[in-house]
């Protein structure tokens, strides 16, 4: 049996919830929901968390995730965990495996301005990005997966055959229902390891991109001014930032296919192509026509959330548009 963990000594600023609190708040994880292609319980303006893996799409409605905060899924035979902190508007997905063994997660508390997870095997404490912070699993890290934060109508337009779980529409929450809401609850603020980074308003929605020890925040408004595609580099690695205009959807990918580094451009119609072959690419980093049709750009750790949470996890992060 694993040695009992004293999380308060391991992470002294953590706000931990006991089993009674979690049960009373109905914060049990969403485990293996029944997926369906029927989605008349969703509204076009519902925020969703979208997964696109192996050319298949799934979406988890924000209002369905706001209470459990964690979903333990099996998609294409692989265990996957999805997390949502509706306070900091940050959602992540990762392959829920350690040394080839599936691992399930639950909400455990709050730490450094966002949620804190525990695995159900050892009760080790994890960040929502899939890194073990304390306990017998400490130092383990899981593979991040691309997860899109956008509205249901936007996701359905990109992925008309997407699958969704069913829930009673009456369960839709009326409070903090949209990403980027103002304010940080005092108990969450108290868990921050450092003072707020005030280079941006705390609830500014940014695409946070991480490459090793380098991190950069791309404010969504700045990306809107650039357009649907941005060629860039981070830590010496060539990347491309894809943004669906007029939406919250944004992700980043490596620009290399084999030995070739691609440069992307936007046509007058808004479609994106690479200058080397003229192939057209979608928001998921997938070539949909041209000589490279079927190729998939490799995902680089990235996701949309509020600035304060990204800065808390990456205090040395650069800000796109404010770099010297």
Image (cartoon, rainbow, N blue to C red):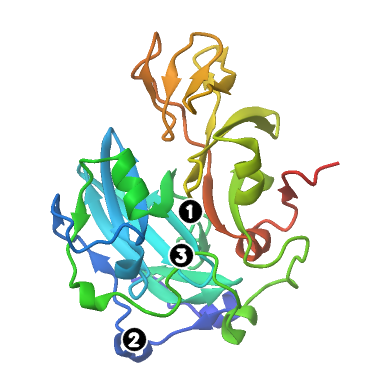
Q: CA distance from mark 2 to mark 3?
A: 28 Å
Q: Is residue 185 above or below residue 92?
A: below
Q: Give the residue at mark 3.
A: 136
Q: Secondary structure at mark 1?
A: loop
Residue at point 47%, 47% (across, down) = 249
Q: Secondary structure at mark 2?
A: loop
Q: Earlier in the sequence, mark 1 or mark 2?
A: 2
Relative placement, left or right, of 134 versus 105 is: right
- Dot 3, crowdedness within 10 Å: few (<14), some or many (≥20)? some
| Labels 2, 3: front one | 2
Q: Give the residue at mark 1.
A: 140
Q: Secondary structure at mark 3?
A: loop
Residue at point 48%, 35% (across, down) = 299
x, y percentage for residue 244? 48, 40
| Labels 1, 2: front one | 2
Q: Is residue 265 above or below residue 310?
A: above
Q: Quadrant of the C terminus?
A: top right
Q: Earlier in the sequence, mark 2 or mark 3?
A: 2
Res 117 → quadrant:
bottom left
Comparing 165 with 119, the one in front is: 165
Residue 231 shows up from this direction: yes
Res 137 → quadrant:
bottom left
Q: Is residue 124 above or below residue 313?
A: below
Q: Residue 286, labelled with which disc?
A: none
Q: CA distance from mark 1 to mark 2?
A: 29 Å
Q: CA distance from mark 3 to mark 1?
A: 9 Å
Q: Is residue 280 above or below residue 55?
A: above
């Amino acid at each position: 049996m694993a040695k009992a963990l004293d999380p308060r000594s391991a992470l002294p600023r953590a706000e931990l919830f006991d089993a009674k609190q979690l049960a009373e708040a109905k914060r049990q994880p969403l485990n293996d929901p029944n997926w369906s292609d029927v989605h008349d319980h969703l509204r076009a303006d519902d925020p969703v968390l979208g997964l696109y893996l192996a050319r298949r799409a799934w979406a988890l409605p924000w209002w369905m995730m706001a209470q459990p905060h964690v979903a333990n899924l099996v998609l294409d035979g692989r265990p996957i965990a999805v997390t949502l902190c509706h306070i900091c508007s940050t959602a992540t997905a990762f392959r829920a495996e350690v040394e080839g063994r599936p691992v399930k997660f639950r909400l455990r508390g709050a730490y450094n301005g966002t949620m804190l997870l525990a695995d159900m095997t050892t009760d080790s404490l994890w960040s929502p990005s899939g890194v073990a912070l304390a306990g017998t699993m400490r130092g383990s890290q899981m593979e991040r997966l691309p997860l899109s934060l956008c509205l249901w109508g936007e996701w359905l337009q990109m992925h008309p055959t997407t699958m969704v779980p069913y829930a009673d529409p009456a369960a839709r929450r009326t409070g903090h229902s949209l990403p980027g809401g103002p304010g940080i609850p005092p108990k969450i603020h108290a868990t921050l390891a450092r003072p707020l980074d005030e280079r941006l308003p705390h609830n500014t929605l940014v695409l946070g991109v991480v490459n090793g020890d380098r991190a950069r925040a791309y404010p969504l408004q700045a990306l809107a001014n650039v357009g649907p595609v941005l060629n860039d580099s981070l830590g010496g690695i060539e990347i491309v930032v894809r943004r669906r205009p007029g939406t919250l959807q944004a992700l980043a990918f490596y620009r290399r296919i084999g030995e070739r580094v691609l440069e992307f451009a936007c046509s007058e119609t808004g479609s994106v192509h690479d200058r080397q072959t003229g192939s057209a690419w979608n928001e998921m980093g997938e070539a949909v026509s041209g000589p490279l049709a079927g190729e998939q750009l490799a995902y680089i750790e990235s996701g949309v959330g509020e600035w304060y949470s990204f800065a808390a996890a990456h205090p040395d992060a650069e800000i796109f548009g404010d770099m010297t």
